[in-house]
Amino acid sequence: MAETGLSDEMLRRLVHAFYDKVRRDDVLGPIFEARISDWGPHLDRMVDFWSSVALMTGRYHGAPVPAHAGLPVEWRHFERWLGLFRETAQQICPPKGAGHLIERAERIARSLHIAVRNAQTEKGAVPLLR
Ligand code: HEM
């Protein structure tokens, strides 16, 4: 925390600002709106997620892979997601903290993309772990 300058409060601001942009995005917005009717719990879950990833608080206990496996997305959607995430992290966090979050987001996006692709290819798909 000391090294990255990140705090829970900052992650909360980041998550809220990021999903404000996502919801207004022409491509990503409709994909999220089709799945999320109550944004409060989703935003709380995402603050817990980033708090676990960046501050090692262990507050997130969900399963990101099955949550994304059925989504109608390709790599270009992840690129767009990452573009908005990079922009928001750089606006809200100090450079070291933003760099840390962006690196983690890029890695997780790649794993989620592999999981989505795998779920989309019925033949030989590896079953999801829940
Ligand atoms: C193409 C880009 C993405 C789209 C369209 C997307 C969409 C969604 C949607 C619709 C949900 C809610 C699922 C539900 O409750 O039914 C969700 C949950 C979530 N997303 Fe994404 N997502 C994307 C990329 C990412 C990335 C890159 C990360 C991490 C760096 C991420 C982390 C999460 C997490 C942690 C959850 C909560 C899962 C749970 O515990 O239920 N997403 N996402």
Image (tube, rainbow, N blue to C red):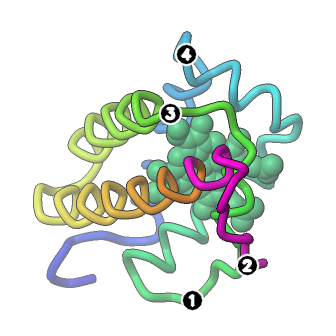
Asked if the residue at tag 4 contacts the one at tag 1, i.e. Cβ–Cβ closer than 8 Å, the answer is: no
Point 29% across, 47% down: residue: 89
Point 75% across, 45% down: residue: 70
Amino acid at dot 4: Val
Helix, strand or loop at label 3? It is loop
| Mark nearer the viewer, 3 or 1 | 3
Q: Earlier in the sequence, mark 3 or mark 2?
A: 3
Alpha carbon of mark 1 to alpha carbon of mark 2: how far? 20 Å
- Whether residue 130 is situated above or below residue 106 in the rendered picture: below
Alpha carbon of mark 3 to alpha carbon of mark 4: how far? 12 Å
> Residue 88 falls in which quadrant of the image?
top left
Q: Is residue 92 visible?
A: yes
Single out the residue that lies furthest toward the right: 37
Q: Mark 3: is the Cβ under 8 angstroms from ligand 1?
A: no
Alpha carbon of mark 4 to alpha carbon of mark 2: how far? 29 Å
Neighbour tally class for label 4: few under 14, some 14-19, many 20 plus, Cα within 10 Å:
few
Give the magenta-colored segment's residue range. Answer: 117-130
* Rendered location of residue 6, percent (x, y): 30, 70
Alpha carbon of mark 1 to alpha carbon of mark 4: how far? 32 Å
Q: Mark 2: is the Cβ under 8 angstroms from ligand 1?
A: no
User: For mark 3, what is the residue?
Assistant: 74
Amino acid at dot 3: Glu
Amino acid at dot 2: Leu
| Mark nearer the viewer, 1 or 4 | 4
